[in-house]
Amino acid sequence: MAYATTNPYTGETLETFPNATDQEVQTALTEAYDVFKTWRHTSFAERAKVMTAAGQILRRDIDKYARLVTLEMGKTFAEAKAETILSAEIFEYYATHAERLLAPEKLPVADPKEGDAILIHQPQGIVFAIEPWNFPYYQIARIIAPQLSAGNTVLLKHASNVPQCAAAFDSLMVEAGLPKGGFRNLYAARHHTEMILSDPRVCGVALTGSEGAGTIIAGVAAKALKKSTMELGGSDAFVVLDDADLEKTVKWAVFGRHWNAGQVCVSAKRLIVADAIYDRFVELYKKGVAELKAGDPMDPSTTLAPLSSQKAADDLLAQVEEAKKHGAVVETIGAPVPEKGAFFRPLLMTNLHKDNEARHWEFFGPVTQLYRAKDDADAIRIANDSPYGLGGAVFTRDTQRGVKVAEQIYTGMVYINHPTMVKADLPFGGVARSGYGRELIGLGIKEFVNHKLIDVVDIDAPF
């Protein structure tokens, strides 16, 4: 696996990085566990100082960090800055709330003779994080902020096309005051995954990535009897009911499908629109997408970034061509894009009938799947006709109606009148082939801790 910085806008490879050696991996494991042995006993207040400092540094040096994201994976500079701030907010959230979230819990017991029972939450060791390129900082922050706050330490294997972003976070945590080795970026080779997960000092693995990667890593973790959390693909439904505020809904649909160049697991990939407003919605949606401007991601006027690599663009095009063979009808709806760079002109895909397997695929880029729904029940049926179950959205003026629809959509998250959001104080995760486990808030910080029961019982109590 070649770790390299290749600018998606220019196509220029700027720097390459060698894979870690076996010895470097072993050294990282030893140092991470040595730090864990003291970090686990460090007070929440001291850990919070490190989290707070990390957030402050990201805010202080926002332009520096954002430029690196735009350089390596191509998102617009504005989006990169927003991601940097979101990452700071995650550190700050756990600085404020970690101690409360992991406070001992007194358990109610049916009979006082059962004892005085409490549940305590203790760190377990090294967490191995395997993260993707589409949000180079956010993906790291949402695992290391809770796990370091809980008293664990973390080793990172980041995506091969964002090596400098990974290294930047390594330096960030040292500058923030984390003991060296408490978080370590590794340019790990493929065989290192099994080596790391087989090590008894490692308590589990958190992966965000493709379904294929999740299948492999979950299998390796299971073989080693290690816990895993999987944040995998998604094909979110964006349901538009017949009473929706059409103008505002369309604006959110255009944004929800095309932010980060459509390379988001919770992108609004499947637009499901009520029959009564379908034609007008499509007219407005095409107009909105056509107004997107592709160009230099550092230019403030750019609203459609290149994809993360030319290979990503080529793979997406090949997937679209395969969908056509299954009967999909594809229409170009975006304005022309530059020939230079890994750009992909937005497309609209219809005729995704019950015999067309393409309706079950995730298109990771600016390709919109469009469906016409007869009524609410039909919209729910279409939304649930997916192997994925990550996020989703329902648009309606009647929020109670929207909630009733949302309750029947089989996903981990549904938003009413807003595309699926990512926030520091909201949980993130899915079901079905979108994975398992949750990240952020109290759910995330408890994924890799030992929930230990301590029960003080009268020695004369019956068994």
Image (tube, grey):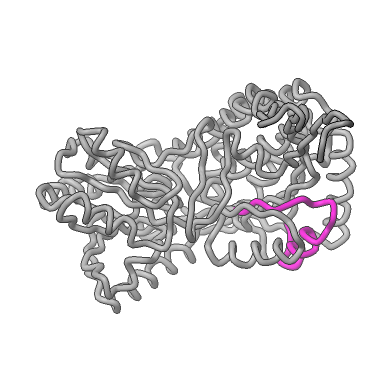
Which of 411/21 is in front?
A: 411
Residue at (26, 34) in percent of width and height: 400
Residue 361 percent across, percent down from the top left: 39, 66
Say which residue appears at 35% left-offset and 50% top-offset. 409
Who's the residue at 56% across and 44% down the image? 438
**Can residue 132 be seen by looking at this rendering?**
no
Q: Is residue 263 left or right of residue 286?
A: right
In terms of depth relative to the viewer, which is nearer, 113 or 423?
A: 113
Q: Is residue 66 magenta?
A: no
At 70% from the left and 39% from the top, the residue drawn is 147
Q: Is residue 76 above or below residue 88?
A: below
> What range is drawn magenta here?
187-207
Residue 352 shown left or right of residue 63 in the figure: left
> In the picture, which quadrant includes the C terminus?
top right
Number of on-image labels = 0
Q: Quadrant of residue 20?
A: bottom right
Q: Is residue 210 left or right of residue 277?
A: right
- Taking the view exactly as shown, the residue that stands out farthest to the bottom is 325
Provide residue 376's location: percent of width, then percent of height: 20, 49
**Residue 291 in view (yes/no):** yes
Where does the image place residue 309, in percent across and percent down from the top left?
50, 59
Q: Which of the 4 quarters of the picture holds residue 198?
A: bottom right
Estimate the x, y position of residue 194 in percent, counting from the top left.
76, 65
Identify the image quadrant of the N terminus: bottom right
